[in-house]
Image: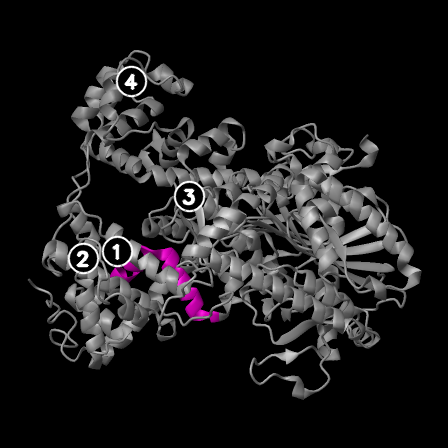
Amino acid sequence: MNTSTHVGTCGCHDARQDIRLAGGCLEHLRRVVEHAAQCLPVQGPLGVFVHYNTLRSLQHRRFEDAVIEGGRLFGAEPFLSEEAYHTERGRQRILDEDIDAILNREPDADILPGRLTRRQLRRVMLTPGVRRVNGINISWQLEEGGWLDSFRNDLPEPSAKALRRDSPQALWDTCLARVKPPPTPAPVMPKRPREVVLAQHGIDMDALIHPPLIRLTGAYLDQGIAYWPMPHRDKGLLQAARKIMPQAFAMFPAHLSGVRADFLRQEAANMDADTVVLDSLAQLDVPLGQWEEFVTEELLALRGWAGMIRMLEVDVTLAPHDRVRCSLMEFLALRLTYTVAALRDISGDTAAWRTTLLPVPRFDPQTHVARVFDVVQLLGISSCELAAFTDEELARLDQEILACHETERRRLLHLAYERRHERRVLIPLAMHRKMPCVVPTSNRLVAQVVFCIDEREESIRRALEEVDPGIETAGVAGFFGVAINYAGIDDSGGVSSCPVVVDPQHAVREVPVEDDAHRQKQRQGLRRVWAGVMRNGFISSRTLVRGWISTACLGFLSLFPLALRVLTPLAFGRFIKWLNRAFLPEPKTEFAFMQDDAASRDATSGLMSGFTTQEQAERVYSVLGPAGLHKGHARLVVILGHGSTSLNNPYESAYCCQACGGRTGAPNARLFALIANRPAVREALRAKGVVISEDTWFLGGYHDTCNEDIHFFDMDLLPETHHGDLARVHQSLDKARTLNAHERSRRFAAAGHDITPESSLRHVQERAEHIGEPRPEYGHCTNAVTFVGRREITKGLFMDRRAFLASYDATKDPTDEALAQVLGAAIPVCSSINLDYYFSAVDNDVYGSGTKLPHNINGLVGVMNGYQSDLRTGLPAQAVEIHEPVRMLFVVETTPERLMSVIKADSELNEIVCNQWIRIATMDPDDGHVEVYRDGVFEKLEGSEEPLPVASSSLAWYRGKMEHLALARIDPRAA
């Protein structure tokens, strides 16, 4: 048995002697682990689910190259299937002119001079397209599928005419005679021991190693669900495992019995995680130059758990309750310990796998011949012509066919797919821009409502402006410029309510007003009593005697609330809320947000309590300034944050405000309104050019995008002179939320096509309360566009809940500082949401989390399939089932020069834009012409093939339709 063949492979030590003194190797190992960590998911625990670019580690590369590389690295699909794109072509979602336009942008070359070019070849390989062939079905297609009986029935007319006097058998025989099959693939070196063991012994090492590794890691990260917490958690994952697993009578699965001895040896030598990993790499004989590939592959084998460990290592505050010390190095050490033990037991040698070649995958030389046979039919090349080709001509044709492989065809079809989407948005948008405003402007608006830029708010904004033309809406990032660490009256500690890339410096707390302090004490006492009851019930169900009694006595009683929740979810939900209001005192509260002196800095948390007046003015200006709201404000300005509440939904935070770190934007909206109403703040704003009228009042509010509830805060502070304004806004918002619910319901098959707006409101409210509803709402599944510009450009335009709408006025931003501020927030946030949905849609099994049906919450940190699996990252199938996977199309109301000056000044924006992770276009603020960014240059939008339909209302346009709809102009005069 050889377990120490690392001698001489890295040159830093000899046969693992003095392994802890190998400083050079240790530093290299830490760099390797750090680099490998970049490939892991950055999804935090369920309570802080935030969208991100799944391939962020490849963001330095061009999008098309990165998705292909990501597919190789993760074993995932880079694009939709070829069949899916041809289905879209069949329903005119992709036009032939889109394919031609994409091919015209690709490099061309002569294949057969004067007769065939690369573009012509690729054109026929894309449409009608080549048939799928492989070594499994080729023989059947030839013998039973009719391939040799007749030519394809979808050949272009010239090709069909050229082959009229030929026969498929003759063409096939010629292909067999002339086409040289590609060489048989050479055996490859393994990347992991698992590959060799699986090939030689038929044993999957991951199936052996993952169950105990999942149990240990899950128990270590548990956030209070387990009755018995894992012992020794304070010592770290590796130490806890070494203390627990070698105990007497511990049982190990087959091939893992050697783990006990390895743990005891490590403990006796007091080996830390770094040393264990170095020792394991030595036993596995992994050369220094291959450490990074090996470590990356091992971590990616269980990337969900590894990624969670990494996230909690970087930011332990993400853990909802128990903040244990996490280390990716310890996780790797634990994994490699099990790997070495399993490999030693199965193979008897921990180093022999390094010199073993993997068997060649199944290869059929006829597959390529069949592909050439298919292509020459499409080209109309007869058997006689093919036989007359010189070897050089045939080699060029053969090479070009190989180059246009399936992934390349899917890439081209995807670009055509995105091009048609782009033109369906930009052409109608430009047409709408040239038309007069549907509703004439008034001297002063009745009210202004400021929403988050979220695309789910596009429909309610449009509905609100339809039902009440006297109300104007605006869109800003949903944390409303106030990055805070917030704690409500029932929260045990503060949480960040701002984008994840921002570290809040200010603490804001909700506290009871002085007169209601006694009600708060009553509330806390009752909550403690109820928490004790629930805790005792939880513990009782997990003990022998009390568990039997509670199951027998309470199990039957729990049937009734369960039946009510399933059969009448909305009524039961309202009943529970009534009970809370009836028995749980709700004190009147206020925000502690004023910072009066420098001593307010908390020495423990490093947070400042509240804001100074100058800081408050800066926060208000950061919202009103870029949005162009410098003056002429309405008497009532509503700041409406948003979030989402649903029952039995592990992904609830994914539906909340991403600008607030996956939490509700209600505290931010309430705080912004309180700040904006302060006279001292308004006085400071005057110096910045923002003049707020004395009779303007800001009111904070909250919109639940799932059940369509709308609430207002601090209504007792509203002057009596504004009660009439609020009544009108409240009435208009009530109508708008009903229409919004109706527009959302068209996507739900259970709602039916003939549902009324009033019934649709009840329908979405029931979905939010239903314990078995996998689709309480569709979240960001329709995201596709981000418009950054004045509201007047998109007002009266039906955008099908597919557009993020960020308010920005280029005419009031001569220095482009506001543009930099808006894009600095909008591009990272919106592109991250979009790319998370893109990857979860193109390969839901690898990049997404699969269907929700087998999901099981583990320790409040993530979901697994069933009782034991890797943590599932990404979005579930139910969240992306109607999503069109296209890159986000940004339309910015500015000039190309101004836009690129902002983009080039920010390294992150430059990487996203120039590497084409998004698509971007400009709309000139003066004349409205559109220019599209392609491969480093802007091209003026030409053409008018996409119409701009006109409808009398949004309801009239979407009624009875479930699919994605084109842009339409909403003009009440069209009735």
How packed is label 2: few (under 14 Cα within 10 Å), some, or many (20 or more)?
many
> Where residue 504 appears, x then y in whole percent?
59, 72
Q: Secondary structure at mark 1?
A: helix
Depth check: 807 or 128 in front? 807
- As drawn, is 353 to the left or to the right of 905? left
Query: In this figure, which residue is indicated by the disc labeled 1?
Result: 209
Residue drawn at 22 percent across, 66 percent down: 248
Query: In this figure, which residue is indicated by the disc labeled 2?
Result: 342
The rendered magenta stretch, by its main secondary structure, is classed as helix
Q: Nearer the viewer, mark 1 or mark 4?
A: 1
Q: Is residue 308 magenta?
A: yes
Amino acid bearing label 3:
Asp
> Where residue 888 appears, x then y in whole percent?
55, 49
Of callouts 4 and 3, the N-terminal one: 4
Query: In this figure, which residue is indicated by the disc labeled 4?
Result: 145
Query: In this figure, which residue is indicated by the disc labeled 3?
Result: 843
Highlighted magenta segment, given as a residue range = 293-316
Q: CA distance from mark 2 to mark 1?
A: 8 Å
Q: CA distance from mark 3 to mark 1?
A: 26 Å
Q: Secondary structure at mark 2?
A: helix
Q: Which mark is residue 919?
A: none
Amino acid bearing label 1:
Ile
